[in-house]
């Protein structure tokens, strides 16, 4: 504002002085030019400082800047997802199955995951595989329940649902890419849905801020991450199918086994499968994090110019 007032004042002096340029006016103009130059330089230096203040760098090798908030957001996202896809359907099923029967209870229980999958597709234009699989499992259970009410067949039904899920795991190992979607291993897709998305942020060589989802960066830059996702997906799929094969053997090849005995064996098998999944996942995550820090530091040196621009 003071520079603008000086410009107006100098302009009025030049108009009133006619053809005579007084020395005092010349000194005033020289001082005005110095002030204007200083003001322009000040404005230029303030611009990048304001941009830097709004830019928060977060690189692969960096610790999470807000660990507590991040953990709470992950827990909330996980609870909401499991509640919609598992908690609410099971609550509906057990509350209405004695009144309307198992078949209709199973079909109605599959509605919340289906509605959530439709909502995700409409809002984010992507397929929620976890919701689709859970909805399909309820539908398959209802179909098998219609076929027969034999207790042994119902055991096969539960195993068949697990086998179908395992088959979907194996299908996602096919490297299919179209302009509408890209198939990634099921473990990668489910993990991305279970946890709230976070992004890496950095400054490129042109001084422009860039960002990418952490999961996408890991998939693009970490070979170990891709191998673990494919290996875990293949292992989970095979374990679920083998559990179904074990149930078939107990039901049809060992008729001397009672239903209670088969149920006990199934519980042991399912516990072993879950234990193998949890242990293998934890081991993979430990090695992935180590590899991410090692590769991330080199990647940051080559791609981040936050301290150089």
Image (cartoon, helix red, strand yellow):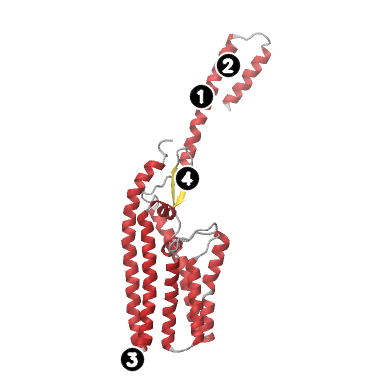
User: Mark 4 to mark 3: distance in Å?
Assistant: 65 Å
Earlier along the polypeptide chain: callout 3 or callout 2?
Answer: 2
User: Mark 4 to mark 2: distance in Å?
Assistant: 45 Å
Q: Position of residue 23 (x, y in %)?
A: 58, 9
Q: Mark 1 vs mark 4: give the one in front.
A: 4
Find disc 3 in the rendering and name its residue.
256
Residue at 35% x, 76% y is 270
User: Mark 3 to mark 2: distance in Å?
Assistant: 108 Å
Residue at 43% x, 86% y is 153
Q: Position of residue 219 (x, y in %)?
A: 41, 55
Residue 166 picture quarter: bottom left
User: Mark 1 to mark 2: distance in Å?
Assistant: 14 Å
The quarter of the rendered structure image containing the N terminus is top right
Residue 185 picture quarter: bottom left
Q: Mark 4 vs mark 3: give the one in front.
A: 3
Disc 4 residue crowd, few under 14, some 14–19, many 20+, Cα 10 Å: some
Q: Is residue 119 above or below residue 309?
A: below
Front residue of this view, candidates 187 and 120: 187
Earlier along the polypeptide chain: callout 4 or callout 3?
Answer: 4
Earlier along the polypeptide chain: callout 1 or callout 3?
Answer: 1
Find disc 4 in the rendering and name its residue.
210
Find disc 1 in the rendering and name its residue.
38
User: Mark 1 to mark 4: distance in Å?
Assistant: 32 Å
Callouts 4 and 3 close, C-beta under 8 Å: no
- Element type at marker 3? loop
Find disc 2 in the rendering and name its residue.
29
Front residue of this view, candidates 23 and 300: 300
- Element type at marker 4? strand
Looking at the image, residue 220 sits to the left or right of residue 42; the answer is left
Earlier along the polypeptide chain: callout 1 or callout 4?
Answer: 1
- Element type at marker 1? helix
Residue at 65% x, 8% y is 20
């Amino acid at each position: 504002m003071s520079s603008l007032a000086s410009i107006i004042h100098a302009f009025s002096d030049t108009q009133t002085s006619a053809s005579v340029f007084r020395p005092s006016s010349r000194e005033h103009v020289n001082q005005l030019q110095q002030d204007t130059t200083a003001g322009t330089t000040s404005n230029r230096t303030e611009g990048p400082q304001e941009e830097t203040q709004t830019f928060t760098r977060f690189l692969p090798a960096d610790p999470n800047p807000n660990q507590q908030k991040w953990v709470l957001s992950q827990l909330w996202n996980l609870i909401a997802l499991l509640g919609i896809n598992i908690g609410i359907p099971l609550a509906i099923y057990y509350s209405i199955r004695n009144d309307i029967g198992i078949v209709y209870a199973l079909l109605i229980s599959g509605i919340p995951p289906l509605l959530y999958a439709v909502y995700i597709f409409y809002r984010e234009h992507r397929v929620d595989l976890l919701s689709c699989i859970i909805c399909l499992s309820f539908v398959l259970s209802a179909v098998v329940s219609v076929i027969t009410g034999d207790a042994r067949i119902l055991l096969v039904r539960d195993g068949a649902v697990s086998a179908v899920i395992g088959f979907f795991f194996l299908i996602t190992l096919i490297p299919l890419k179209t302009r509408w979607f890209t198939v990634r291993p099921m473990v990668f897709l489910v993990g991305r849905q279970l946890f709230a998305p976070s992004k890496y942020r950095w400054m490129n060589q042109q001084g422009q801020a860039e960002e990418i989802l952490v999961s996408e960066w890991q998939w693009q830059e970490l070979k170990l991450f891709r191998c673990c996702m494919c290996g875990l997906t293949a292992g989970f799929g095979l374990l679920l199918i083998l559990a179904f094969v074990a149930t078939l053997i107990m039901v049809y090849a060992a008729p001397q086994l009672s239903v209670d005995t088969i149920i006990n064996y199934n519980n042991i098998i399912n516990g072993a499968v879950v234990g193998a999944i949890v242990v293998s996942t934890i081991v993979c995550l430990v090695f992935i994090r180590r590899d991410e820090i090692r590769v991330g530091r080199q990647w940051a040196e080559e791609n981040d110019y936050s301290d150089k621009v």
